[in-house]
Image: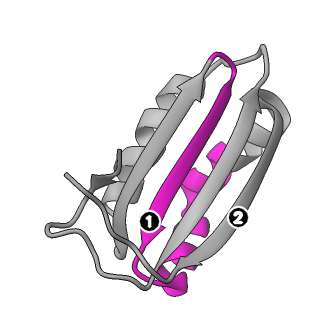
Amino acid sequence: MIYWHVNPPPKAPFIASIFNYYLSDDLDGYEEYDILTLELAKKSSGFLGYESFKHQDRGSFISYWIDMEAVQKWARNPIHIEAKNLGMNRWYRYYHSQIAEVKHFHSKN
């Protein structure tokens, strides 16, 4: 389920930033940064919404943005950069990220 930050949900096209990961055993500080970065993203210009899935040590987080400029601005956020560095060095055994343009979107509520 997508938690839209805008109402009504956006019309395509928009951007999806897709992050898939496997957690490591060292999760010191992970939950705090997870909450903090989501709250900061919600306050970022161009943020449209997100969805998140976690099962055991595997997860996926997809954030939706109005355009690439908004994605790039979020990528430069100092706390987001700090969280990414901690993730690479501590929290994730594996991850990959992708940026995709959503050209068509429909849903049923």
The residue beneath circle 1 is 64
Relative placement, left or right, of 58 versus 108 is: right
The residue lying at 55 percent from left, 46 percent from top is: 61
Residue 78, image x and y in percent? 58, 59
The residue beneath circle 2 is 98
Q: Is residue 101 above or below residue 8?
A: below
Question: Tag 1: Cα neighbours inside 10 Å, few (<14), some, or many (≥20)?
Answer: many
The residue lying at 54 percent from left, 64 percent from top is: 77
Magenta-drawn stretch contains 8: no
Residue 18, image x and y in percent? 62, 57
Which residues make up the magenta segment? Answer: 56-83
Q: Quadrant of residue 83?
A: top right
Q: Quadrant of the N terminus?
A: top left
Q: Is residue 31 above or below residue 47?
A: above
Residue 61 in sight in this render:
yes
Question: Tag 2: Cα neighbours inside 10 Å, few (<14), some, or many (≥20)?
Answer: few
| Mark 1: amino acid | Tyr
